[in-house]
Structures are given as C-alpha cells and as structure tokens.
Image (cartoon, rainbow, N blue to C red):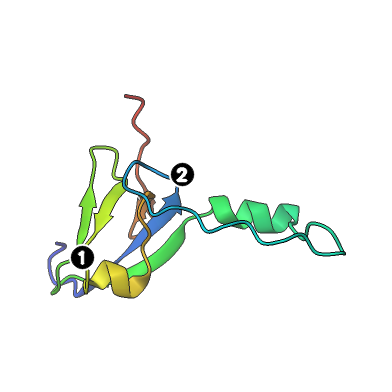
Amino acid sequence: KAAGAASMTLGFSVTGAGPTATPAAAEPAPTPEGPRATEEGLASLSRPSVVRVDLARPLGVFFDKRCIAERIGEKTQAEELGVPVAAQVRRVNGGEIPRLTT
C-alpha cells in the first residue's frame, strides 16, 4: 500500500484459460453476414483492462507466481470489478510489470 493512497490502478490482460478457469460459452451460430471480428477488436483483447481498486478493502484474487488470477473470491472487490479467472496483472499504477520467463 502506497503511503497516503486510498486507491490504485491495476491493468489486467487475459492470458488464456487456466485449469481453474470457467468453461468458455458455446460459440454462437454463424450469421448470414459472416464473421464480425476486426483487427481493431482483436487488438483490444490484448490490451490490459484497467480497474481502480480500493486499498481499504481486500481485492479477493488468488494469484499464482506469475500474477495470474487462479481464483476470484465470491462477493469481493475483484468480482464486483469483473476481474476474470486467468487475468494477469500487467500494470500497477501505470507502471509495467516485467514478464517472468520461468
């Protein structure tokens, strides 16, 4: 906790489904217009989602050693903020976290 700080920002990106991830929803039926994905849409999935957390409350995320969310506690700040299982912390207060190679 930073001295005097009441909140901080965390940037998450989803790295893929881990062993505790919720199963993916069934793929929707194709539409007559064909696929609707765009390069911009796909690129937005790789950018971190930024959330502001209240430092006076527990976050409610159980992380592994690579800062990947293994579990999200029920009725916690993380659940309220929509942090998904398998999300990886990439930024803290705008500063990038180095990637681990092991």
Q: Could you tell me which residue is drawn at 53 percent across and 54 percent down?
A: 47
Disc number for residue 16: 2
For residue 59, the mark is 1
Q: Is 76 drawn above or below residue 60 in the view shown? A: below
Residue 100: image location, x then y, percent: 33, 31
Q: Residues within 10 Å of mark 2 (few under 14, many from 20)?
A: few
Tag 2, which secondary structure? loop
**Identity, as a three-letter code, of the amino acid under mark 2:** Gly
- Label 1 packing within 10 angstroms: few (<14), some (14-19), many (20+): some
Quadrant position of residue 27: bottom right
Q: Residue at x 21, y 63 (%)?
A: 73
- Which percent across, then down, holds residue 48? 47, 56
- Give the number of the mark in front: 2 or 1: 2
Q: Which residue is pictured at 19% across the width and 63% down the height?
A: 60
Considering the numbered disc 1 on the image, is that residue within a helix, a strand or a loop? loop
48 on left or right of 53: right
Q: Which sits in the foreground, 95 or 29?
A: 29
Q: Indicate the quadrant containing the C terminus: top left, top right, bottom left or bottom right.
A: top left
Task: Classify the position of the N terminus by image quarter.
Answer: bottom left
Amino acid type assigned to the residue bearing label 1 in the image: Leu
Residue at the far top: name it: 102
Separation of residues labelled 2 and 1 (CA atoms): 21 Å
Q: Do the numbered discs 2 and 1 sit on residues whose CB atoms are within 8 Å?
A: no
Where is residue 11? Give x, y as percent: 39, 58
Residue 41 sits in which quadrant? bottom right
